[in-house]
Amino acid sequence: MMISKVIFASTLFAVAGLASADVIVSYSYTDLDGAFDSASSTFTADATAGGGSLDTGGDVSRLLGAPGTADFESGFMALGSFADVQISLSIFNITPDSAEAEGTLTITDIDGDTLSADVTGSWTILNPFGFMFFSGVSNGYIFTDNGQTDGEFNGTAGSFDMSDLVGNLYEGAVSLLLQNPGGFGADFSGVSTEGDGVLVPTPGSVLIGGLGALGMMMPRRRK
């Protein structure tokens, strides 16, 4: 879509000072179930296997050390494993074209290992079409080996060694993109949402400027 191309182009300039080799882990998921509850002012984006237009799929990739990718095929939520994606953000300072947010995200692999973070950031809402873009940062990304304690982050296909990542805190960014005319003006649910993010070993001055958007706009293989 045109909006993706515009944001991607501007982001290239924003992150030019950060070498791609600094990115330890990246992740990308499509067709998350985006929803907003106005009573609690909470936005959620969760993995789903609705059997229709929203069948979440994605991947988590290690880029440094021992590279590897944990793929999660579209509809993986219907396979009965622990694999999941849960994002929950409290929304405040809402205007027709912007909002602030803070909350948590958790990505779970097939045997219960997690990548989680507290995030803060801001929403940009492009009217009248309702493109909604969240750009957030975190200084607390952490891997936890909850499953078979095998030191692996496992997808429905593929995996990577996370044994030396477990327990360490990483800087990072997260981006969300969806389209909902009206923004946060009323409740909504079942809105296809893309979520992407990166982890880096140290803070970078360009991270807040747009690294989150860069991860989201890079081409990804659909499962």
Image (tube, rainbow, N blue to C red):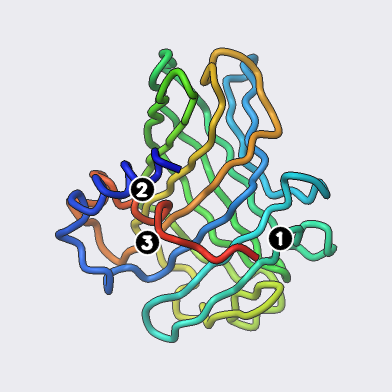
Looking at the picture, tell me which residue is in the foreground, 149 or 173: 173
* Vertical position of residue 45 compared to residue 181: above or below: below
Q: List x then y, in percent, for residue 164.
A: 45, 80
Q: Helix, strand, or loop for circle 2?
A: helix
Query: Which mark is nearer the camera, 1 or 3?
Result: 1
Query: What SS does tag 3 mark?
Result: strand
Look at the picture and state if 198 lies above or below 195: below
Check residue 170 in the rendering and tell me which mark sits there, or answer none.
3
State if disc 2 and disc 1 touch (CB < 8 Å): no
Pick the front one: 160 or 6: 6
Left or right: 176, with 3 as reference point: right
* Residue 44 versus residue 11 in the image, above or below: above
- In this figure, which residue is indicated by the disc labeled 2? 213
Q: Which numbered circle lies on residue 74?
A: 1
Q: Secondary structure at mark 1?
A: loop
> Does the residue at mark 3 contact the one at mark 2 (Cβ under 8 Å)?
no
Q: Dot 3, how many residues are within 10 Å of its Cα: few (below 14), some (14-19), or many (20+)? A: many
Q: Position of residue 108 (x, y in %)?
A: 65, 61
Residue 114: image quadrant is: bottom right
Which badge, 3 or 2, comes first in the chain's sequence?
3
* Among numbered discs 1 and 3, the one appearing first in the sequence: 1
Q: Which residue corresponds to the image point at 21% horizontal and 55% vertical from the top-left?
A: 15
Image side of residue 93 versus residue 83, left or right: left
**Real-space Cα distance between discs 1 and 2?**
23 Å
Q: CA distance from mark 1 to mark 3?
A: 28 Å
Query: Label 3 amino acid?
Result: Tyr
Query: Where's residue 160, x and y in %?
Result: 54, 80
